């Protein structure tokens, strides 16, 4: 059992340690593009003047992504926060497995290919963009090349449109070259095509059981071949753009590609299906729909007997899915395991959209409790709505719960995620972003006051930027920016306990992975071996 050694010089604090994760709130350009800067944030503004304030790197190599051109995201951000180290993430591991050829040597790929050799169809379902948060289109292209080399004759791609980790209306940037490549591959008796698709927020990629009808819609399009029909995917996108000039890719209705004989790629017995996203949160539900015998979330109508594989395994404990192309990163020795091993009680809360972030991602992509006797996880149900229509989301409800838990005094470590900066940031709607950020700030004020009254310590940070960049200017043209940013995030320690004198240690280039060791110091423990160093030390009294 993992446990933490006490810091000999630390004095105990009677109040709790409260970690507030302001999802999607980064430190931006401090001008009119910066939705955090322009919003009413008196609490955050005052906090940023605190002496124990550091700016943390939250993107690229600091969170285990392939390069510093990669923006941060909640998975890698919460993994780094909760595991105290920089872990090579899925995006990077798959690139390596493709470059070394390893991905094509595994048993799962062999079975995918076998289905193709037996004259059944190989299907690829996933997000077609270069966002590198859930997937990367280059990885799909590499798998298609693999099918070609292996002699697979029939391939179908089910293309989920992004517009959330990339530009809002960029679908054709990925779909057209994909169609061109598939056409090139369709020679010598091969037949490779896009068969269905739809915007990711309405088709297939739901998360944390927030809205199963989204997955059902995907199932109908991909498996049953039921959705509005178009001669090609790019024609579907162009038609939807024309019919509703306000539509953006992430919300685009599902579609199937059909020819004179009907839909070109329903999934049938004997086929193989690869879900080529590497990130788990939005891949788990569709994987369950393919794999579970006693599935009850919606009526699947027809359940084809297929070989199903994920790009990765999305949940190691629940073994979802059973088969996968690349081993997921091992995120072990998490802070949660150490705290449980040391008898520290903890409470985690967020609303549905981010609930798994402070539990599953925080715990290294493991679902469920580490120790139910010491931990309590609570989910506040999110609205099922585009969040620019309810930018306050459930921040007040989360805050109410945190205040009750602080008052109860049973938990030593409390962590919460306020989703607004990110979820509303992804809509790019400025008036809504202002309300989202102001809401978060207001709630933060309530939490700080409660921590003060309890004589605890508050730590305020974020997992990555989003609301801090609402638009960009390209060639004099303003383009809305709904994706995450490359900006750093704040780390602010507000000590209302006063039992110890903390000082910054001046770690060079601090990042999210330094937070776990910092939390250990604040709780009066040495950081585990191998963790990135704590950002604070204890001054002699
Ligand atoms: C999403 O899944 O909503 C986005 O792709 C990434 O957002 P998150 O990393 O903040 O969850
Ligand atoms: Co986000």
Image: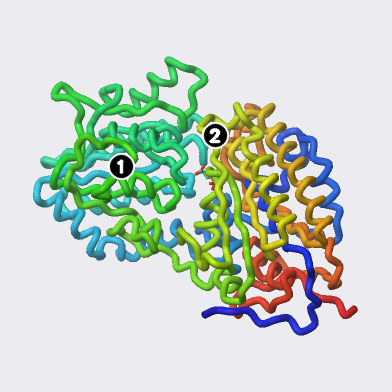
Residues at marks 2 and 1 touching, judged by CB atoms closer than 8 Å: no
Q: Determine whether, in the image, residue 518 is placed left or right of residue 262.
A: right
Identify the residue at image location x=74%, y=58%.
459
Q: Determine whether, in the image, residue 33 is placed left or right of residue 130.
A: right
The residue at label 2 has a CB less than 8 Å from ligand 1? no
Q: Determine whether, in the image, residue 491 is placed left or right of residue 498.
A: left
Q: Determine whether, in the image, residue 107 is placed left or right of residue 285.
A: left
Q: Mark 2 points at which residue?
A: 383
Q: Closest to the observer: 447 or 135?
A: 447
Identify the residue at image location x=47%, y=60%.
368
The residue at label 1 has a CB less than 8 Å from ligand 1? no
516 up-or-down from 367: above or below: below
Question: Can residue 213 be seen here?
Answer: yes
Quarter-of-image position of residue 103: bottom left
x%, y% of residue 363?
A: 52, 63
Q: Mark 1 points at which residue?
A: 296
x%, y% of residue 491?
A: 73, 57
x%, y% of residue 140?
A: 34, 48
**Callout 2: helix, strand or loop?**
loop
Q: Closest to the observer: 503 or 479?
A: 503
Looking at the image, tell me whether mark 2 or mark 1 is earlier in sequence order.
Answer: 1
Identify the residue at image location x=28%, y=40%.
157
496 up-or-down from 182: above or below: below
In space, the residues marked 2 and 1 are separated at their CA atoms by 22 Å
Identify the residue at image location x=34%, y=54%.
311
Q: Closest to the observer: 532 or 31?
A: 532
């Amino acid at each position: 059992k993992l446990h933490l050694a006490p810091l000999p010089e630390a004095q105990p604090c009677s109040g709790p340690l409260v970690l507030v994760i302001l999802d999607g709130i980064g430190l931006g350009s401090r001008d009119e593009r910066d939705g955090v800067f322009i919003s009413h944030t008196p609490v955050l503004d005052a906090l940023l003047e605190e002496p124990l304030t550091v700016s943390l790197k939250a993107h690229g190599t600091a969170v285990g992504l392939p390069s510093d051109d990669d923006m941060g995201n909640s998975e890698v951000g919460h993994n780094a926060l909760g595991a105290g180290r920089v872990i090579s993430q899925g995006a990077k591991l798959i690139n390596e497995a493709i470059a070394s050829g390893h991905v094509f040597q595994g048993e799962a790929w062999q079975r995918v290919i076998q289905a193709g050799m037996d004259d059944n169809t190989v299907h690829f379902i996933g997000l077609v963009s270069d966002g590198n948060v859930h997937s990367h289109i280059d990885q799909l292209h590499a798998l298609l090349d693999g099918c070609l080399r292996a002699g697979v004759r029939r391939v179908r791609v089910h293309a989920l449109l992004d517009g959330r980790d990339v530009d809002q209306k960029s679908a054709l940037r990925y779909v057209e070259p994909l169609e061109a490549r598939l056409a090139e591959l369709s020679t010598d008796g091969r037949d490779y095509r896009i068969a269905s698709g739809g915007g990711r927020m309405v088709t297939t990629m739901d998360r944390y059981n927030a809205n199963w009808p989204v997955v059902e819609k995907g199932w109908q399009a991909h498996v049953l071949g039921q959705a509005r029909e178009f001669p090609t995917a790019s024609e579907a996108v162009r038609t939807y753009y024309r019919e509703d000039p306000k539509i953006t890719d992430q919300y685009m209705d599902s579609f199937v590609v059909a020819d004179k004989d009907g839909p070109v790629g329903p999934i049938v017995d004997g086929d193989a299906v690869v879900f080529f996203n590497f990130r788990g949160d939005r891949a788990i539900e569709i994987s369950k729909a393919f794999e579970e015998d006693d599935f009850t979330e919606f009526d699947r109508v027809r359940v084809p007997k297929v070989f199903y594989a994920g790009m990765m395994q999305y949940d190691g404990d629940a073994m979802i899915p059973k088969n996968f192309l690349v081993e997921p990163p091992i995120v072990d020795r998490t802070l949660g395991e150490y705290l449980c091993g040391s008898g520290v009680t903890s409470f985690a809360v967020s609303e549905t959209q981010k609930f798994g972030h402070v539990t599953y991602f925080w715990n290294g992509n493991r679902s469920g409790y580490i120790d139910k006797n010491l931990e309590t996880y609570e989910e506040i149900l999110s609205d099922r709505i585009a969040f620019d229509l309810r930018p306050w989301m459930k921040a007040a409800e989360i805050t109410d719960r945190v205040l009750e838990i602080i008052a109860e005094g049973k938990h030593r470590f409390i962590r919460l995620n306020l989703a607004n900066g990110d979820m509303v940031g992804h809509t790019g709607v400025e008036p809504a972003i202002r309300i989202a950020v102001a809401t978060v700030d207001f709630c933060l004020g309530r939490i700080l006051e409660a921590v003060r009254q309890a004589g605890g310590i508050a730590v305020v940070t974020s997992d990555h930027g989003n609301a801090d960049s609402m638009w960009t200017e390209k060639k004099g043209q303003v383009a809305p920016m709904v994706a995450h940013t490359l900006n750093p995030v704040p780390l602010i320690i507000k000590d209302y306990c006063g039992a110890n004198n903390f000082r910054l240690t001046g770690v060079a280039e601090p990042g999210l992975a330094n937070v776990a060791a910092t939390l250990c110091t604040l709780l009066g423990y040495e950081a585990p071996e191998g963790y990135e160093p704590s950002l604070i030390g204890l001054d002699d009294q």
